[in-house]
Image: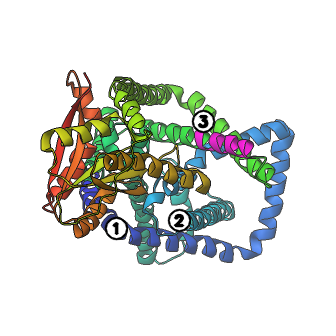
């Protein structure tokens, strides 16, 4: 079934979602029917049921006290709170939602909140009305559904029971689907911030959409084999990590509202909501770790810690690489001096039919300048026009609010204009193009077509770092973006030259 899910997702997100939609609809319809049916059939017993519940509650508080009762409720909540983990999928999959994404995500969250709350409340009410109690080898839902269909004809009862149980089982495949959709995108976001190999940030390239899915499915198969299919262990593994995520999310939101309290009028209300969520998730996480520590909790913490340490090791490698690049950046000072000199910028007319060098850069830095100087050195005065393309990548550092996004746009525009000024001062025509997005390859593809319409004799260039010693680790963490762009343009028949830039 895991292999089937992998194949299904390799065909595309739309196809996989359409396939699973009927399962979700059957689940909703059957469970809504059971809840309404239970309430209607026991409508005359509601008063007595409420009174019995009040008596039971008073009995519990007198035995355990109000604090004990509160802790008991939290314990019960922690056991069933996995029901709400689907909300995580909305945030992880926000990039694939329909525009406007934020409004769509908020609306989706509202629907999920209301539907989950009403479903849980409805089923718990039905448990009480039908006096459903735990039975060996059966879930409470199975006990409830058997009681609901007890008075029906054998054929109808068995058919309905089979349908509703199958819909619950099949719903787990929708839960698994969120991992295949959201997993590669989470890796992409982490890659943009250098916690995972940068090659994972190429959303439009098949590495993430295809290999990301293979990675998710492969990890699932490995865990299945290691655990020998132990439901107990796998649920512990799933639950603890989900609530680590929830804890970090709520903690981040509490921190955010505290930081913007001077600008946000309703910050007290919002920090209270997220503070309550933080308290609940901390309690649930601690409860799960303590109670399930010997049933797989320690293995879960070990696996999670290993992944965290791997992420830190990857980020450390990228920070070391930045230090290696400082030697390349010595050229930046020289170029800045040339730009700010009193030498007048030459006014040159643009002839769009002349040979044009199109350079992809990621800032006014040593890599870009070395690439430019190599073009001068290797091709001399062949190219009369120069077009510099800078695609700003939206990541956690700049995608916070509209003001910061606008500043990010102006910063990359200022950076790329330095190339334009430098080239014009050396007697060539130059201009710049800037875009921002989450996918460099996709944006590059769109820009290349527009450039060719204006400059038909264009050749595209990009620089690639060459390290002192090629290792498996360096190959995994580098050497991808420029090759991904080249491969995309190659299929469109557009020439793209990669120039090696040594860092030793």
Q: Is residue 258 magenta?
A: yes
Q: Nearest to the eye among marks 2 and 1: give it.
A: 1
Relative placement, left or right, of 376 versus 167 is: left
Is the C terminus in the top left, top right, bottom left or bottom right quadrant? top left
Q: Answer few, some or many: residues within 10 Å of disc 1's Cα (few below 14, many 20 plus, some between 14 and 19).
A: few
Q: Is residue 22 left or right of residue 130?
A: left
State the image quarter where residue 156 is shown: bottom left
Q: Is residue 302 above or below residue 424?
A: above
Reply above or below: 486 against 32: above
In the picture, measured across the screen, residue 85 lies left or right of residue 9, that is right
306 or 500: which is nearer to us? 500
* Secondary element at tag 2: helix
Q: Describe the element under mark 3 as helix, strand or loop.
A: helix
- Give residue 335's position: percent from left, percent from top: 37, 36
Q: Which residue is mark 3?
A: 285
Q: Position of residue 27 (x, y in %)?
A: 47, 68
Of callouts 3 and 1, the N-terminal one: 1
Distance between the alpha carbons at the discs numbered 3 and 1: 34 Å
Mark yes or no: residue 264 visible. Answer: yes
The circle drawn on residue 14 is 1
Residue 352 within the segment the image draws in magenta: no
Location of mark 2 (residue): 145
Q: Kindly identify the residue that appears in the image at 58 percent across and 30 percent down.
A: 291
């Amino acid at each position: 079934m895991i292999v089937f899910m992998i194949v299904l997702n390799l065909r595309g997100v739309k196809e996989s979602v359409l396939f699973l939609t009927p399962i979700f609809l059957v689940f909703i319809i059957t469970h809504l029917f059971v809840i309404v049916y239970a309430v209607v059939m026991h409508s005359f017993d509601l008063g007595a049921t409420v009174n019995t519940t009040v008596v039971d509650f008073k009995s519990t508080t007198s035995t355990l006290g109000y604090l004990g009762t509160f802790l008991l409720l939290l314990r019960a909540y922690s056991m069933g709170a996995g029901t709400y983990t689907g909300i995580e999928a909305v945030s992880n999959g926000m990039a694939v939602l329909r525009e406007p994404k934020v409004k769509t995500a908020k609306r989706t969250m509202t629907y999920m909140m209301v539907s989950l709350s009403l479903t849980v409340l409805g089923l718990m009410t039905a448990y009480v009305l039908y006096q459903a109690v735990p039975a060996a080898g059966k879930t409470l839902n199975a006990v409830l559904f058997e009681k609901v269909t007890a008075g029906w004809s054998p054929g109808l009862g068995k058919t309905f029971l089979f349908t509703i149980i199958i819909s619950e089982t099949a719903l787990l495949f929708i839960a698994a689907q969120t991992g295949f959709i959201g997993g590669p995108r989470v890796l992409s976001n982490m890659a943009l911030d250098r916690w995972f190999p940068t090659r994972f940030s190429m959303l439009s390239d098949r590495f993430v959409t295809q290999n990301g899915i293979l990675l998710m499915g492969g990890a699932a198969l490995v865990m299945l084999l290691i655990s020998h299919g132990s439901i107990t262990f796998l649920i512990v593994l799933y639950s603890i990590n989900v609530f680590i995520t929830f804890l970090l999310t709520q903690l981040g939101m509490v921190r955010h509202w505290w930081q913007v309290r001077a600008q946000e009028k309703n910050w007290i209300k919002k920090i209270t909501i997220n503070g309550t969520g933080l308290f609940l998730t901390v309690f649930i996480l601690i409860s799960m770790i303590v109670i399930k520590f010997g049933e797989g909790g320690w293995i879960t913490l070990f696996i999670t810690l290993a992944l965290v340490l791997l992420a830190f090791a990857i980020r450390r490698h990228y920070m070391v690489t930045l230090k290696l690049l400082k030697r390349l950046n010595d050229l930046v000072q020289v170029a800045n001096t040339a730009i700010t000199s009193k030498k007048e910028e030459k006014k040159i007319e643009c002839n769009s039919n002349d040979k044009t060098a199109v350079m992809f850069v990621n800032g006014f830095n040593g890599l870009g300048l070395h690439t430019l100087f190599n073009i001068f050195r290797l091709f001399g005065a062949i190219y009369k026009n120069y077009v510099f393309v800078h695609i700003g990548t939206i990541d956690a550092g700049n995608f916070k609010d509209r003001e910061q996004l606008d500043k990010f746009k102006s910063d990359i525009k200022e950076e790329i204009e330095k190339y334009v000024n430098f080239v014009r001062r050396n007697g060539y025509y130059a201009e710049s193009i800037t875009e921002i997005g989450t996918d460099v390859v996709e944006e590059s593809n769109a820009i290349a077509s527009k450039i060719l319409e204006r400059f038909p004799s264009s050749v595209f260039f990009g620089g690639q770092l060459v390290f002192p010693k090629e290792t498996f680790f360096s190959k995994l963490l580098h050497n991808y973006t420029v090759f991904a762009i080249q491969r995309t343009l190659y299929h469109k028949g557009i020439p793209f030259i990669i120039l090696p830039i040594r860092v030793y």
